[in-house]
Image: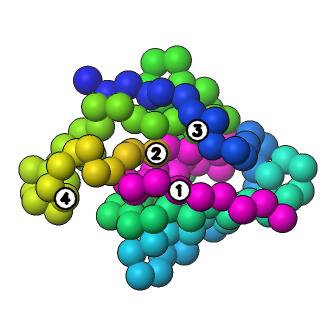
Amino acid sequence: MEIAKQIEPGFSTADAESPEIHQEDGDVRLRFKDWQERIVEVFFADAIAHKWESIESYYEGERNDSSYEILGSGWIAEHVQQRIIKDSAEYKHYKLNFNGWGQFEVLAQGYTTKTS
């Protein structure tokens, strides 16, 4: 059963603008302008999958302007089943909700952020 566990990633997706997604050498970079007009860059290391959805779907209790780790992720289980990754513990399923813009999801080993 998938459960959305809210996380505090060190940035806010609430009222963010202009999300951009860049992929290079197995890493994914998400760049957007936050509600204070600051540029936020999030680097996902060793990302094996990512997607942007303009439609919004939520787990019970999930907010449209917050960030989550999806526990019991079926998306991770599919990658294990197809032998893309060896063990579900290697990766985490992150979901970032950009109220009004859409949702970004990624499977990665971790992330770092930079704000300017």
The question of residue 114 being in magenta is answered with yes
The crowd level at tag 3 (other Cα within 10 Å; few <14, some 14-19, many 20+) is many
* Element on which disc 3 rests: strand
Q: Amino acid at mark 1?
A: Tyr
Image-based side of 49 in relation to 101, left or right = left
Residue 28, how many percent across, how many down? 49, 69
* Element on which disc 2 rests: strand
Residue bearing the label numbered 2: 94
The question of residue 75 being in magenta is answered with no
Q: Whole-Å distance between the Cαs marked 4 and 2? A: 16 Å
Question: Is there CB contact under 8 Å for labels 3 and 2?
Answer: yes
Residue bearing the label numbered 4: 85
Residue 38 seen in this snapshot: yes
Question: Is there CB contact under 8 Å for labels 3 and 1?
Answer: no
Relative height, residue 57 to residue 55 (above, below): above
Q: Amino acid at mark 3?
A: Ser
Q: Amino acid at mark 2?
A: Tyr
